[in-house]
Image (cartoon, rainbow, N blue to C red):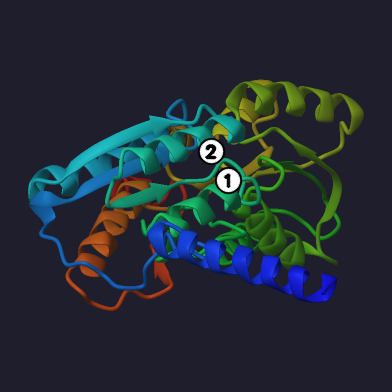
């Protein structure tokens, strides 16, 4: 009899629980799906574009911003632009803010390619396409990455420096922000190219920053007075380095091609720059978003052109 009583109780509980579930429409035994693979077509004038740039204290990224706003304004799109101030935590919070504001697309220029991955995934889960600009993300799904070929830029910088120096000459390398995709790739291209020809006696980070470029170069020159060249992974560090250098024969090579960098090439203070087109990068990022919302295919990589700029041809790029 006890067994039958237990069975009746269990059946009663199960029936009650089933009725409870039937009456609760919100109950689901599967996790919610936030993202969607379906592209909803939208016209340019209705598009809300969220933008997170690593820093607006660097003229290069000011140009990227200008390219974004130029195309957006021409087509009637609205933009919300955040300056991460080279703080990866702030950038992640800014992206989360853009997600909450339900922008249609987010253009990100990461401070750190690893640190931004979680925010990219959050945007993915919210069904918001993400476009990386100048630097990629090491996680999450990107609609496309708009950037110059940074490995190629490093190779070009290496070949140019080799053409200006003798075999086994000592050189120093100023590295960008640790973890930044551009820093890793530019360093890879440069180091693999000069290996066995030039002697890199030191590599030190100056975080893509002008003031740090100056102070780091001062320390390098004191420790290694025989160096003949400095490779800076961006113009800002090179512009800092030339303030610390008193030797007119010192070869200084960088990558970027901003206005102040080109002026330094014209004056002979920077020997050569592998020049990118930051404004074009911004323009291409917005155009990629437009293609996506028209239902057109967007390639995973959107290349931006690069050129070697020296005193001989700088007038063409100013």
Q: Are marks 2 and 1 in contact (CB under 8 Å)?
A: no
Q: Residue furthest right?
A: 223
Q: Relative to residue 50, is residue 300 drawn left or right?
A: right
Task: Report the disc number at residue 92.
Answer: 2
Q: Relative to residue 293, is residue 134 drawn left or right?
A: right
For label 2, count other residues whose C-alpha is less than 10 Å away and answer few (under 14), some (14-19) or many (20+): many
User: Which residue does the image show at 82% across and 30% down from the upper left?
Assistant: 220
Front one among 171 and 40: 40
Task: Report the disc number at residue 254.
Answer: 1
Which quarter of the rendering shows the C terminus? Answer: top left
For label 1, count other residues whose C-alpha is less than 10 Å away and answer few (under 14), some (14-19) or many (20+): many
Q: Is residue 275 visible?
A: no
Front one among 133 and 262: 133
- Label 1 element class: strand
Image height of 119 relative to 94, above or below: below
User: Which residue does the image show at 68% across and 55% down from the upper left?
Assistant: 184
Question: Hey, which quadrant is residue 229 in on the image?
Answer: top right
Q: Position of residue 157 (x, y in %)?
A: 60, 57
Q: CA distance from mark 2 to mark 1?
A: 29 Å
Q: Residue furthest front?
A: 1
Q: Is residue 189 visible?
A: yes
User: Which residue does the image show at 71% across and 61% down from the upper left?
Assistant: 188
Mark toward the viewer: 2 or 1: 2
Q: Relative to residue 136, is residue 66 drawn left or right?
A: left
Question: Hey, which quadrant is residue 83 in on the image?
Answer: top left
- Label 2 element class: helix
User: Which residue does the image show at 46% across and 58% down from the upper left?
Assistant: 125
């Amino acid at each position: 009899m006890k067994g039958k009583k237990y069975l009746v109780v269990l059946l009663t509980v199960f029936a009650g629980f089933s009725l409870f579930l039937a009456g609760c429409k919100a109950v689901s035994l599967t996790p919610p799906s936030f993202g969607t693979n379906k592209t909803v077509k939208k016209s340019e004038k209705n598009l809300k574009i969220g933008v997170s740039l690593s820093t607006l204290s660097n003229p290069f990224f000011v140009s990227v911003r200008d390219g974004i706003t130029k195309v957006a304004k021409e087509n009637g799109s609205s933009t919300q632009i955040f300056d991460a101030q080279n703080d990866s935590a702030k950038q992640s919070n800014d992206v989360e803010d853009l997600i909450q504001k339900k922008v249609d697309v987010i253009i990100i220029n990461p401070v750190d390619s690893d640190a931004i991955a979680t925010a990219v995934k959050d945007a993915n889960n919210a069904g918001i396409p993400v476009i990386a600009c100048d630097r990629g993300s090491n996680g999450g799904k990107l609609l496309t990455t708009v950037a110059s070929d940074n490995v190629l830029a490093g190779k070009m910088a290496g070949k140019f420096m080799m053409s200006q120096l003798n075999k086994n000459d000592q050189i120093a390398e100023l590295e960008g922000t640790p973890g930044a995709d551009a820093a890793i790739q530019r360093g890879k291209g440069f180091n693999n190219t000069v290996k066995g020809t030039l002697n890199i006696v030191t590599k030190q980070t100056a975080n893509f920053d002008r003031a740090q470029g100056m102070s780091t170069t001062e320390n390098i020159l004191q420790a290694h007075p025989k160096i003949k060249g400095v490779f800076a992974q961006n113009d800002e560090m090179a512009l800092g380095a030339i303030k610390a250098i008193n030797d007119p024969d010192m070869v200084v090579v960088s990558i970027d091609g901003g206005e102040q960098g080109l002026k330094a090439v014209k004056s002979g203070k920077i020997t050569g720059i592998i020049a990118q087109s930051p404004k074009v990068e911004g323009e291409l990022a917005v155009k990629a978003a437009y293609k996506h919302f028209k239902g057109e295919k967007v390639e995973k990589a959107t290349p931006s052109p690069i050129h070697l700029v020296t005193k001989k041809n700088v007038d063409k790029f100013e």
